[in-house]
Amino acid sequence: MKIKKKIVQILGPTGVGKSKVAIKLAEEIKGEIISADSIQVYNDFDIGTDKISYKDMKGIPHFLIDIVKDCSQFNASNFLDMSYKISEDIINRGKQPIICGGTALYLKTMINGIFPEKKEKKVSREYLNGIVNKKGLKYLWEELEDIDPCYAKKIGKNDRKRIVRAMEIYYNNGIPPSEIFKRTKTQYKDYTFIRVGLLMQREELYKNIEYRIERMIENGFVNEVKYLKSKYPLSCPPFKSIGYREILMFLDNEIGFETAKKLIKQHSRNFAKRQLSWFKQEKDINWFKAENFFDIKGFVKKSLWKDQ
């Protein structure tokens, strides 16, 4: 009888304590951790990403952290390919892969896959954003409605990011987004996913987020950004992420320090809300209170042994 390959995902909003749960779980089930964080892949961007220290890893191997040494774009396709190879290696060594992170696209891509886009692009996302800036989002949405009414209705008139992405797909592939999404492929087709979502009372979550930001500031976040600004071009992807962009605004004298700190907290809270909204749409996630590790451990162990 062939043993089914299984993979655990620990997910949830920023500040909920995913890393702590993943490490405790790894100690219990002989696990190794693959990070699903779109910014922690970048080397040197440490404090602003709240990157886990070697000491806090407690001897558990971690992957896909500090792997991009320059400013090249790291995307869901890169994550899918690399995480799959690492997962296979972990399983072949008799260990259990645990995916830990809050980048919803990466986590979902593992299950649903990536659609086969053409590499040569006729139209860039920047060009389409320029059209939106000049003619308005409604103009681009109406174009999408003409070529793919079902998908246009699904995402709505105000979802700029998805509207632009949908039209980018159409112009570069000549196929409506709904059609190309049907052609998605994932290397993980032989895997069973055990998805664990972490929840926390909103007030406590926000308190954790604010505490973490204060800790980042105390640990030298501003000096880190000064250093990174001198080493890397401002086009480097992590500079666009929450925390880095506000501190850059402060360093450029666009806003005061207290305003920068206030904005980081506000934008982080808003991001946590959006993450929860994304995750709540997915029906295969099993939700637990972050502090209930006993229940989490029991559920994961039972799921791992099921059908073996």
Image: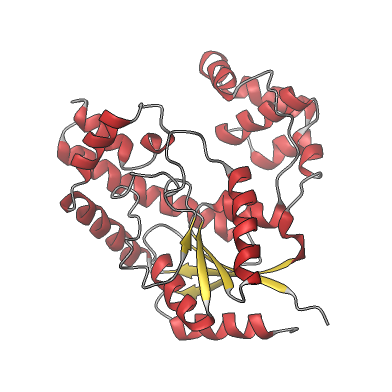
Q: Quadrant of residue 188?
A: bottom right
Pick the front one: 255 or 120: 120
State the residue at coordinates (23%, 36%).
227
10, above or below 132, in the image: below
State the residue at coordinates (51%, 52%).
103
297, above or below 233, in the image: below
Q: Quadrant of residue 215?
A: bottom left
Residue 284 as seen in the image, left or right of residue 38: right
Residue 174 as seen in the image, left or right of residue 61: right
| Residue 194 appears in the figure | no
Extreme top residue here? 134
| Residue 172 appears in the figure | yes
Q: Position of residue 32 (x, y in %)?
A: 51, 69
What quarter of the picture does the C terminus occupy?
bottom right
What quarter of the picture does the N terminus occupy?
bottom right
State the residue at coordinates (16%, 41%).
258
State the residue at coordinates (34%, 30%).
232
